[in-house]
Image (cartoon, grey):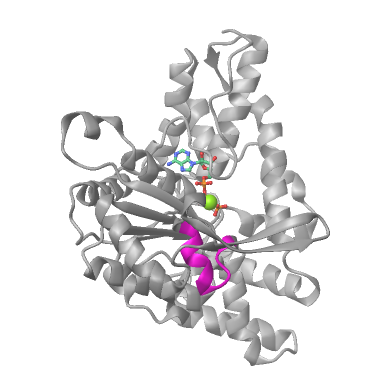
Amino acid sequence: MSTKRKNPFTPGYGRFPPYLAGRETEQNLISEQVEALADGDYNVTDITIVGPRGAGKTVALQWAALEAGKKKRSLFSKKRTPQVVRILPDVLKRKEDIPKLFLSPKDFDIDTIETGPSGLRAKWLPIGNSLTGFFPRLVKQSKRRPLILLLDEAHSLAPELCGFMFQIVQAVRQEGGLLLLILAGTPGLYGVMARARATFHERGAKISLGLLEPEAAADAIRIPLAREGISIKEVSLQRIVADSQCYPYFLQAWGKALWTEANKCALTTLDDELVNHAAEEVNAIRRGLYEDRRSQWRGVDQRFLIEIAKAVKIRNSFGPEALENTVRNILLGQDRSEDETSPLIEKLVATDFLWKPWGSTHFIPGIPSLVSYVIESEEGSGEKFAGVREPMLAGGLAW
Ligand SMILES: Nc1ncnc2c1ncn2[C@@H]1O[C@H](COP(=O)(O)OP(=O)(O)OP(=O)(O)O)[C@@H](O)[C@H]1O
Ligand SMILES: [Mg+2]
């Protein structure tokens, strides 16, 4: 193995993994809609992707962009390659910001020229800058070339703007424009959608991204290593799968650490000894992530979090009513008002502690073993997170 080779693994947010594991159904759903749009079908289904941090939402959006740009299409078919516009909510503060997303510098006209302290200053005005002027342009543009809007981090979008985006998309389509909207966000997006009062999410396709299946988690490590000429003993791989709890972000962290260790010792077969070495780096990453989540809770709320963690550990999942009752009881024990129930449940969701996949009746933990970390941090036994956790066979995942 050459020491100059680049580590193929990509622990980090929004970085396309060396092998996209276990998301075939979701990939197919996205590809179908992208193909339909490229085919000139304006009756496409918009898609909303929801999942906790690190589950692969941005990667799913990147998949849509890759599908849109794939070479095969322009060579062998009459389909039109869609234009992809990526949007982040921080550039969308007001309705008037929306046209800017679609305009290039040549679409701007000089409005006024003023003399200022640093000489002449031109004020630029987009051609057709008003929302009403912008709308026909968007219809025309999307008829000429299909347009895909990828809106990431959509949970931080103001609900009014979210609703407005949906209206524009619907209206453009009604005028025969070729437009596909794909939104991605943490489970906080449910609340934004509900407040946007849009029928969008009822009609659109929904993708929940949670943990991978164990076989897919193993592939996420095994396949990229194999491409590098490295094999891993099955028993060691299974330890990694169990330790990662099939969480995509941890799997990339594991892959990177394994590759680094293997590269150091020029090994081509990985075993438990190497896994134990690699665990140090993985644990540092994991502790950082857990601490980040835990530190979003302070004082009496941190005590509340510990109590809820204990309840989750016993029950594994909660129906909405059971969750409300549990939160209310903890609040009672803390001499706090019941009125805090809903805001606290919202915060549990916003901090990835609990989430509810589409169609599921139960809340489950968002990031694996954050629950155990919170409990153990109270007991001061953080060392449990220092080694590789052994496979948990009975009863599914140990949160
Ligand atoms: N199916 C997968 N197989 C292997 N690795 C994956 C998969 N999906 C995501 N990853 C990896 O997991 C990490 C997190 O992915 P990504 O950034 O897309 O998550 P996210 O849901 O957008 O997180 P956030 O909410 O923080 O933005 C990245 O390192 C990515 O490469
Ligand atoms: Mg992301």
Start-end of magenta stretch: 91-101
Quadrant occupied by the C terminus: bottom right
Q: Which residue is located at x 51 percent, y 57 percent?
A: 108
In the image, taking residue 369 as reference, residue 387 lies left or right, namely right
Q: Nearer the viewer, residue 116 or 100?
A: 116
Vertical position of residue 314 compared to residue 223: above or below: below
Q: Nearer the viewer, residue 96 or 137?
A: 137
Quadrant occupied by the N terminus: top right
Quarter of the rendering containing residue 49? bottom left
Q: Nearer the viewer, residue 92 or 114?
A: 114
Report whether residue 24 is seen: yes
Q: Which residue is located at x 26 percent, y 51 percent?
A: 144
Majority secondary structure of magenta residues: helix
Q: Position of residue 345 (x, y in %)?
A: 58, 77
Q: Which residue is located at x 58 percent, y 70 percent?
A: 93
Q: Position of residue 390 (x, y in %)?
A: 57, 39
Report whether residue 315 is seen: no
Quarter of the rendering containing residue 112? bottom right
Q: Position of residue 252 (x, y in %)?
A: 55, 35
Q: Position of residue 361 (x, y in %)?
A: 38, 72
Magenta segment includes 235: no
